[in-house]
Image (tube, rainbow, N blue to C red):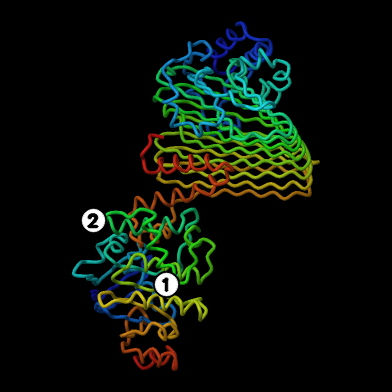
Amino acid sequence: MLQINDLHASIDGKPILKGISLTVNAGEVHAVMGPNGSGKSTLAQVLAGHPAYEITGGEVIYNGENLLEMDAEVRAQNGVFLAFQYPVEIPGVSNAYFLRAAYNEIRKAKGLEEVDPMEFLDLVEEKLKLVDMDPSMLNRSVNSGFSGGEKKRNEILQMAVLQPMLSILDETDSGLDIDALRIVAEGVNALKRPDNAAIVVTHYQRLLNYIVPDYVHVLAGGRIIKSGDKSLALELEARGYDWVLETVA
Amino acid sequence: MTTGLRFAEQAVAASVADAPGSIKALRAEGAESFKTLGFPTTRNEDWHYTSVQSIATAQFTPAIDRAPSTGVTTESLAPYTFGADWPLVVFVNGRFSAELSTLAALPAGIRVLDMATASAQEAELLGKFLGTAAPANRDGFTALNAAFAGEGTFIHVAKEMVIEHPIHILHVMDAQAAGIMSHPRHVMVAERHAKASVVESYVSLADVSYFTNSVVEAFVEDGATLSVVRIQREARSAYHVGTVEARQGRDSHFLTFTFQTGAALSRSNVYTVLDGEGCGCTINGLYMLDGEQHGDHQTRVEHVKENCFSREAYKGLIDDRAHGVFNGKVYVHPEAQKTDGKQTNHTLLLSEKAQIDTKPQLEIFADDVKCTHGATVGRIDETSLFYLKSRGVGKVLAKQLLMYAFAADVLETIENPVIVEALEKLTVERFTGSSSH
């Protein structure tokens, strides 16, 4: 589904990603872990098409196409989804309107009919249960005045509605208490299918107790320095990032 | 004599024409004042960013000298009205139209009369108010409005009366409006503890060049509430100057909302005097300009007495080469202790050539007051844009959503949901290009 080959990216002329290679197949969950400043979030944002980053080398092939040539909205229309580390507040646009607009834009891109508001409401109400959100949240402005946990749940709600092929979760666990974490993780697990895949970016192993990865990659200094299975995450938790940095050096 | 000799000559001619007593007196004062004041120039601090040369050098026929247009029908007004049960006062090309207006169902105690009827039937009552909040010598445009007085509305809501539906004053221009100048003057009185709401809208059925110069005199007596929503959707080639002057009594509340999207050159003035303890005003607005439009807003709130509040929020979206101006003055007199004032002006510039001059001004001569003001000028937030795009929303729709979101919160400050909905629709149409203005 996704092949990242020797990807280099920089922001404001400063190199952040220095040669990342990673292959993600359908049905897989990959965890990307690493210390602060390692480039984890940059990788997530570059894959989603954030305009602030400049690609200075390498390629990303998504379902046989050059992902880096697509605008952010085209990537989303083709099934790429980024759950933001810091979901953006948009006062004045209701959650319901935003979700429907996104849903219909993606349907339009696929040549499908738009759905009307009533039809859409039925669909959303079902998804709301998945993340234990109150329907009243639909009438509030997007993320505006939401608590940290509500914002993250709202991200997973969007993911549930948009049904992406490749989900990238950027530190979705940060700032969540254990109950919120469990709700978010259960939501993600419920959306897992043999034909989709997820990249879970996290600083802590905690989330991986709930979303069990097939592969764990350690990112440091803009490169993947170690890959393994889920036991690598446990080892990192026990021994810290210094341990892996030392073993690689 | 400064500028506008032709206008002064026309004003003198109007002042000697036959008219009811109070109108004739106002015209004479107007003509005399305009001869002294002329049109303001950019050397005048209040007009620093707005040149009215294009008006001063043009030639217009007073609407009162033209025969009323007969081409406008109730059907052609339908897109501009709100509800069948709203009292409607229609002016076509600056002339009152009794046929298109619907004023029959008003209860006793609520008077809505056109100026000619008012000056004939309610001369004494009208005379107590006409020209007192906005005196003819106030400035050049107010003088000109006085000089050509004769059309307008007299709204009088007796004490403790509450009007059910807003009164809609609809100014409509058609193709025959080319080259006319219209000077409507609306006098609105909300007596003690009355509650009234007025919508004053300016629309056109054809893109012709004309000049509207309106004056509203609002009297909000003790404990009364008066809301005035001004919707300026003039033709793209038109000129519009609109002034609201209010006088407020104790514990009164005066609210205005100015929605400005039309005209080539537009100036909106909202002035109020908080002249009774515990009263307050809410002065909000939304302007959307594009092409070569120039839109100017000036507000002045005078805190004269203690314990008064003022709330002011203007927002604007400016595209292409359009130029916006905001100048908000809050003046706190020495005896106006415990004044609570808040003023904001936020503008989004949508193109490199779009321009805004924003100038909030606080002048405080009392020592125990709470006054804040703030102005921001920005562009569409790139992070928000990326967020929407990352959900599959295309760039054009994403921008429209963010522009609409920026405008929506100030629209929602309007109390009447029917007006909010209508203005939201106009706002969306403006952004999606499905309407000319």
The residue where tag 1 is placed is A130
Depth order, front residue of B349/B284: B284
- Res A111 label: 2
Depth order, front residue of B79/B294: B79
* Same subunit: marks 1 and 2: yes
Mark 1: few, some, or many residues within 10 Å (few <14, many ≥20)? many
Q: Amino acid at mark 2?
A: Gly
Of circles 1 and 2, which is in front?
Answer: 1
User: Residue at 27% across / 79% down in the picture?
Assistant: A27
- Res B418 label: none
Identity of the residue furthest to the left in this view: A64
Quadrant of the drawing holding the C terminus of chain B = top left
- Could you tell me which chain the residue with mark 1 belongs to? A
User: Residue at 44% across / 49% down in the picture?
Assistant: B403
Task: Let me know if residue B19 appears in the view.
Answer: yes
A203 sits to left or right of B89 = left
Q: CA distance from mark 1 to mark 2?
A: 28 Å
- Tell me where residue B142 appears, x and y as whole percent: 61, 23
Q: Secondary structure at mark 2?
A: loop
Depth order, front residue of A144/B47: A144
- Tell me where residue B106 appears, x and y as whole percent: 62, 27
Q: Amino acid at mark 1?
A: Leu
Q: Secondary structure at mark 1?
A: helix
- Tell me where residue A119 appears, x and y as whole percent: 36, 57
User: Residue at 59% across / 45% down in the picture?
Assistant: B313
Quick one: label 1 or label 2, which is nearer the N terminus?
2
Identity of the residue furthest to the right in this view: B335
Vertical position of residue B367 compared to residue B53: above or below: below
- Tell me where residue A116 appears, x and y as whole percent: 35, 53
